[in-house]
Image: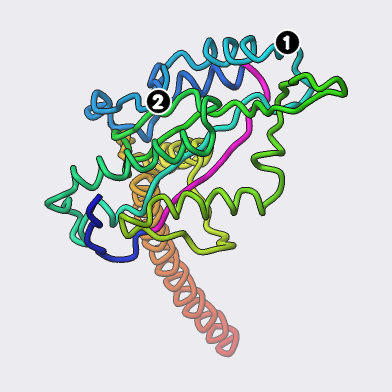
């Protein structure tokens, strides 16, 4: 594959989260298949989302995968599945002015193919599902993996069990996965993110908190809340900041009015004091 031109500092993004129950798996299934609404989703583009690996029946596929490997009991608090989120810097798809690169579609296809190949090479049949989302701020993949591992019992028989520690046991293993993913994207001139970075991402919980905060501030300022959900947490945050500035401005205006009233009272009080002293001297 021809190497794409290097525009800016394009970095890999690879995050992982463990889930312990089918209840959580069902929620993830609804979220990634858009069966439930999310405020950070632009529904106008949801029809562009597409399945890259497996099927959208995540819970059913997990059950079949466990049954196929004769795993019938789940340990309490054991990890049932791991969700990986794969993406790259927005600059890989967009120019500094916000417009897409002329070859953005080619870039997207190359990144998706490289990411799919990496998932299958790294996790094999344990990677049950990968879904591409194009209805949020930056294209990204949600990959669902069930951490089935193979070992041998004392009689030499094959035994399968769930073993998330074999994949995410400690920071070193996640770091190795991030190194591996960066290696798979190297032909696209996408580099590994900063090692040991403390950079954080916006969770849905944080997003909803921002939404609620914006509504609270709108109500406090007697302003109408936005009708449509913005495309990202950052735009919500911008709204919150603008409204906060407006409130500060209103607050400052009210304080200035109060200061004026207080100043008038001070002047009036001073006049009265002088009048009282003058009357006393004349008595």
> In this orientation, which residue lies closer to the viewer: 100 or 80?
80
Residue 196 in the image, given as x and y percentages of width and height:
59, 62
Kindly identify which numbered label has been placed on residue 124. Answer: none
Q: Nearer the viewer, residue 224 or 14?
A: 14
Give the labeled residue for mark 1: 72
Residue 67 shown in magenta: no
Name the residue located 71 percent from the left edge and 14 percent from the top edge.
71
Pick whichever of labels 2 and 1 is earlier in the sequence. Answer: 2
Task: Classify residue 45 as left or right of residue 273.
Answer: left
Check the image and report above or below for 216 versus 32. Answer: below
Q: CA distance from mark 2 to mark 1?
A: 25 Å
At a point 58% along the width and 90% down the height, the residue shown is 281
Q: Nearer the viewer, residue 126 or 265?
A: 126
The residue nearer to you, when weighing 42 against 104, is 104
Q: Secondary structure at mark 2?
A: strand
Examine the rendering and report whether any part of residue 254 can be seen. Answer: no
């Amino acid at each position: 594959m021809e190497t794409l031109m290097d525009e800016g500092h394009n970095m890999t993004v690879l995050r992982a989260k463990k889930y312990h129950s089918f209840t959580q798996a069902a929620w993830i299934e609804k979220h990634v298949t858009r069966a439930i609404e999310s405020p950070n989703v632009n529904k106008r583009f949801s029809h562009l989302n597409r399945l890259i690996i497996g099927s959208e029946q995540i819970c059913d596929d997990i059950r079949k995968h466990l049954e196929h490997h004769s795993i019938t009991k789940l340990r309490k608090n054991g990890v049932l599945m791991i969700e990986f989120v794969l993406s790259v810097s927005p600059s890989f798809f967009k120019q500094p002015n916000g417009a897409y690169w002329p070859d953005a579609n080619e870039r997207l296809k190359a990144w998706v193919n490289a990411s799919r190949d990496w998932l299958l090479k790294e996790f094999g049949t344990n990677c049950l599902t990968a879904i591409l989302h194009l209805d949020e701020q930056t294209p990204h993949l949600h990959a669902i993996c069930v951490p089935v591992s193979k070992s041998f019992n004392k009689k030499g028989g094959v035994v399968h069990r769930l073993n998330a520690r074999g994949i995410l046991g400690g920071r070193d293993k996640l770091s190795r996965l991030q190194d591996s993913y960066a290696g798979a994207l190297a032909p696209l001139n996408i580099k590994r993110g900063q090692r040991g970075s403390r950079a954080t991402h916006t969770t849905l919980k944080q997003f909803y908190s921002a939404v609620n905060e914006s509504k609270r501030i709108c109500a406090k300022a007697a302003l109408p809340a936005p009708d449509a959900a913005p495309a990202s947490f950052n735009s919500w945050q911008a709204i919150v900041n603008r409204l906060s500035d407006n409130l500060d401005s209103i607050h400052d205006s009210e304080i200035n009015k109060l200061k004026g009233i207080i100043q008038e009272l001070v002047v009036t009080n001073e006049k009265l004091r002088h009048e009282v002293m003058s009357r006393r001297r004349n008595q």
